[in-house]
Structures are given as structure tokens and as C-alpha cells.
Amino acid sequence: MPAPIPTQSFTVPTEWVDYNGHMNMGFYVVAFDFKATDPMYAWLGLGEDYIAERNMSVFSISSRTDYLAEMFEGDTATIDTMMLDFDGRRMHYFHQMYNAAGKVTATNELVAINVDLEHRKSAPVPDDLADKIRQVVAAHSFLTRPRHVGRKIGLR
């Protein structure tokens, strides 16, 4: 069981750079979603096939992103993911984006819920997939919890 879950590297495209000359904040979320969350869901069996085969999906219900260092056009980044918790319906996970030098440039913390698409209501994750998620949580429980997990937002 990989701990944490790695992703492939990606390069910041021109279209993701804003008038400040760095990666726009919205594209950090795009990168976390498409380069880390979607591949993780597919690996767990919760990707597009999950919708087609079981008429279920996973919806994000809470998300927090912290921007810690700038990324620029052409920079290479990787994201790893730590599965923090799972209660049978909801998953709590944490992404960290690294630049080529290994510095954490952004974090993205999410809670997602399993949804029965026929009824558009939360439902338990099927047992076979829930077992795999629990194994990931157990494997990741030995990792050092990143300092940004559960951080509140505010001025003081």
C-alpha cells in the first residue's frame, strides 16, 4: 500500500499563469483535482467506472487550499496524498504539492462523501471498496501528519 499515494509529475502550462506572473490560485485546485484526486479515486475503484458499474460517485463537501510558495510557467510539480480518515461514507484526505526542489508549494485538504446517484443521497461505500480505503487509512496512519491539516482560517 503506497504511503503516501504518489502522482505523476506535471508542468505548469502558460494558461495557468495570471497577471502576477505565477500560477493562478484556481489552477492549484484544478491541479489537485485532476492530477491527484481523480487518479486516487480511480486507483481506489471510485472513478468513472464506479459511476457506470454501481451508479455511485464521490462528491467533495469541504475543501481548503493553502498557498505556500509560488509556482511559475514551466515549473514541474508533483502531488502526494495522505488518506486521513474514513467513516464508511466520508473520506478525509490531504494533498501536498511539491516543486522540483521538493519544497511544499501548496496543500489541499478535503472531505468527500459517497453518493447514490439514483437517489442523490449519501450512501455507504460498498464493502469491497470500503475495505481498501480502510487499508489505506491504516497504512497512512504511520505517516507524520502535515502541520496544515485541520488548520483554521482567520486573522488571529
Image (tube, grey):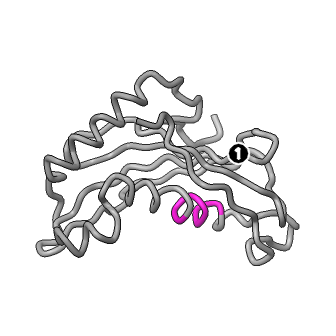
**In the image, 89: left or right of 100?**
left
Quick check: 37 above or below 86? Answer: below
Residue at 69% across, 61% down: 10
Q: Indicate the position of residue 132 as horizontal and vertical percent values.
A: 27, 42
Q: How many marks?
A: 1
Q: Indicate the position of residue 86 as horizontal and vertical percent values.
A: 28, 40
The residue beneath circle 1 is 98
Looking at the rendering, in which quadrant would you find the N terminus? top left
Q: Find out whether residue 141 is within the magenta segment.
A: no
Q: Main secondary structure of the magenta part?
A: helix
Quick check: 97 above or below 49? Answer: above
Q: Indicate the position of residue 144 as horizontal and vertical percent values.
A: 53, 23
Looking at the rendering, in which quadrant would you find the C terminus? top right
Residue at 83% across, 66% down: 73
- Badge 1 amino acid: Tyr
What range of the chain is rendered magenta? 28-34
Within 10 Å of disc 1 (Cα), the crowding (few <14, some 14-19, many 20+) is: many
Q: Indicate the position of residue 103 as horizontal and vertical percent values.
A: 76, 39
Q: Find out whether residue 29 is within the magenta segment.
A: yes
Residue at 57% across, 44% down: 80
**In the image, 153: left or right of 137?**
right
